[in-house]
Image (cartoon, rainbow, N blue to C red):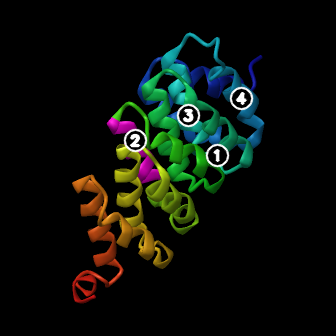
């Protein structure tokens, strides 16, 4: 006779989104007990893209280091939808441990995924500021600098002020825009014109 874990996994992988949506929080409520089954569903040899996505969605509901680790492992997956789910989940969990991987995702070939990574970093907030500042100052990727400046603008971390001032001179008008927006949100909008 199947136990509740087996039943919930069967519902999650049923191919029916309504059933999966109901099963995901119930499975997540089992916490780390469910991780080994979710790990199986996201394994590289898994051919069921729908089951992988629902497993990632469920991982995003589990508040544990093991779940964060599994979500982070999906950031290199070739399936863009799965990467998007993992990025969003890491943002929901405010997973500070995943900051370096989310910074790397700012350069994703998909501009949608890069923006989603920036949004996840905004949700993480001030713990992401030092890595975002470094990305803004050091990245050769214009896309990374744009998303780093945008995230810093929304986080409004005072330690980003010097980097945002320097970013006003960036070759990208979008980096300049977000640097200006960030300075404005920090209350320094027009002050730099008086210098």
Q: Quadrant of residue 166?
A: bottom left
CB-based contact (under 8 Å), mark 1 and mark 3: no
Residue that carries the numbered disc 2 in the rendered image: 114
**Is 81 rendered above or below residue 141?**
above
Percent across and percent down for residue 62 are 64, 46
Q: Residue at x 52, y 65 (%)?
A: 129
Mark 1 vs mark 3: give the one in front.
Answer: 3
Which sits in the foreground, 119 or 41? 119
Give SS at disc 2.
helix
Q: Which badge, 2 or 1, is on the more N-terminal residue? A: 1
Q: Which badge, 2 or 3, is on the more N-terminal residue? A: 3
Mark 2 vs mark 4: give the one in front.
Answer: 2
Q: Which residues are magenta?
A: 111-120
Q: Which badge, 2 or 4, is on the more N-terminal residue? A: 4
The span from disc 1 to disc 4 (Cα, nearest Å) is 15 Å
Residue that carries the numbered disc 4 in the rendered image: 5
Give SS at disc 4.
helix
Q: Which badge, 1 or 3, is on the more N-terminal residue? A: 1
Q: Is residue 174 magenta?
A: no
The span from disc 1 to disc 3 (Cα, nearest Å) is 17 Å
In this picture, residue 165 sits left or right of residue 47: left
The span from disc 2 to disc 4 (Cα, nearest Å) is 35 Å
Residue that carries the numbered disc 1 in the rendered image: 62
């Amino acid at each position: 006779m199947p136990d509740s874990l087996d039943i919930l996994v069967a519902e999650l992988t049923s191919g029916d989104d309504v059933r999966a949506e109901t099963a995901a929080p119930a499975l997540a409520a089992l916490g780390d007990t469910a991780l080994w089954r979710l790990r199986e569903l996201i394994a590289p040899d898994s051919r069921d893209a729908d089951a992988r996505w629902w497993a990632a969605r469920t991982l995003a509901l589990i508040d544990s280091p093991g779940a964060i680790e599994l979500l982070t492992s999906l950031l290199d997956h070739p399936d863009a939808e799965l990467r998007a789910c993992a990025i969003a989940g890491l943002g929901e969990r405010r997973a500070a441990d995943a900051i370096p991987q989310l910074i790397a995702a700012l350069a994703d070939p998909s501009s949608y995924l890069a923006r989603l990574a920036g949004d996840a970093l905004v949700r993480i907030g001030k713990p992401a500021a030092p890595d975002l500042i470094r990305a803004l100052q050091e990245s050769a990727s214009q896309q990374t600098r744009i998303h780093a400046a945008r995230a810093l603008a929304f986080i409004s971390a005072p330690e980003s002020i010097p980097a945002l001032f320097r970013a006003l001179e960036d070759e990208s008008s979008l980096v300049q825009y977000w640097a200006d927006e960030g300075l404005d949100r920090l209350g320094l909008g027009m002050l730099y014109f008086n210098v």
